[in-house]
Image: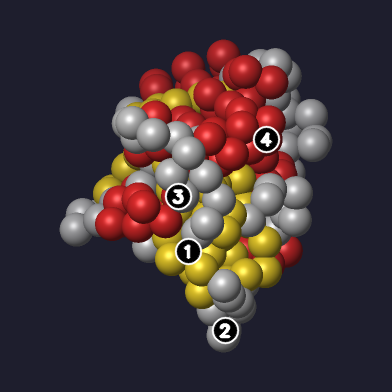
Amino acid sequence: MLAKDYISLEIPILKSSDTCAQVLRWMDEYRVLHMPVFKGAEFIGIVSEADILNVEDESQPVQSLENKLMKVAVQGHSTIYEVIKLMDDFKLSLLPVLDDNKRLMGTISYKEVISALVTVFNLNARGAVFVLEMNYVDYALSEISRIVESNDSRVLSTHVSFHPDSNLIDVVVKVNTESLTGILQTLERYDYAVKASFGSSQTDDQLQERYEELMRYLNT
């Protein structure tokens, strides 16, 4: 699950000479809040819509905001989890992906991240997702599977992420049933802490909301 596998070439790449007004038009057209800026072949940072809206003269070049540009990018061999963490840490709607020579390969937006999560958690399959929080020493996949199977369901995939400077972990579990009621009740009866749950049938707006929630649980 590498960044290079999910890059998009759809988003225009800004030149440092592009005007702030042009950048705003592109952000509106492509529905992003951030875009990478290049001076020749050199990546100089990510500009945000918020910074441009604070500019008094939108005819000035985006390079005039260079001291506010975020120097954040990932490499093609970065994992999708590193992408998720950076997007969450810096509240970005998009990240540039660079090769080993720091040349642009493409960009990753939340849409590409969702596509990656669909693959990781087998979300195309019928089912739902829940997140458990527990101490690492208490984690036993066999016990969680037994509880799921006692409710006539099966575990399709799992992911474990560690809390920083803590023995706590989040366990993300995908199951093959859309109704989690019985599973969650049984888990709680066995004193599992259910941190979140996500159904499999979502509208586009709900999908974006679920993406934002999942990012909070998948930091690595």
The residue beneath circle 3 is 62
Amino acid type, mark 1: Ala
Circles 4, 2 touching at the beta carbon (< 8 Å): no
* Residue farthest to the right, as pictured: 125
Helix, strand or loop for disc 1? loop
Residue 188 screen position, x and y as percent:
40, 23
Question: Closer to the camera: disc 2 or disc 3?
Answer: 3
Single out the mark in the foreground, 4 or 1. Answer: 4
Closest to the observer, 53 or 119: 53
Q: Which residue is mark 4?
A: 30
Instruction: Characterize the local packing of mark 4: few (<14), some (14-19) or many (20 or more) Cα atoms within 10 angstroms.
Output: few
Residue 113's spot in the image, x, y percent? 62, 46
**Which quadrant does the N terminus fall into?**
bottom right
Specify the amino acid type for callout 4: Tyr
Where's residue 164, x and y in %? 25, 56
Residue tagged by mark 2? 100
Question: Would you say 50 lies left or right of 10 here?
Answer: left
Q: Are marks 2 and 3 in contact (CB under 8 Å)?
A: no
Q: Nearer the viewer, residue 31 or 108?
A: 31
The disc, 1 or 2, on the residue closer to the chain's N-terminal end is: 1
Residue hosting label 1: 73
**Apparent side of residue 213 relative to residue 191 in the rendered image (left or right):** right
The foreground one among 207 and 141 is 207
Which of the two discs, 4 and 1, labels the residue nearer the N terminus? 4
- Name the front one of labels 4 and 2: 4
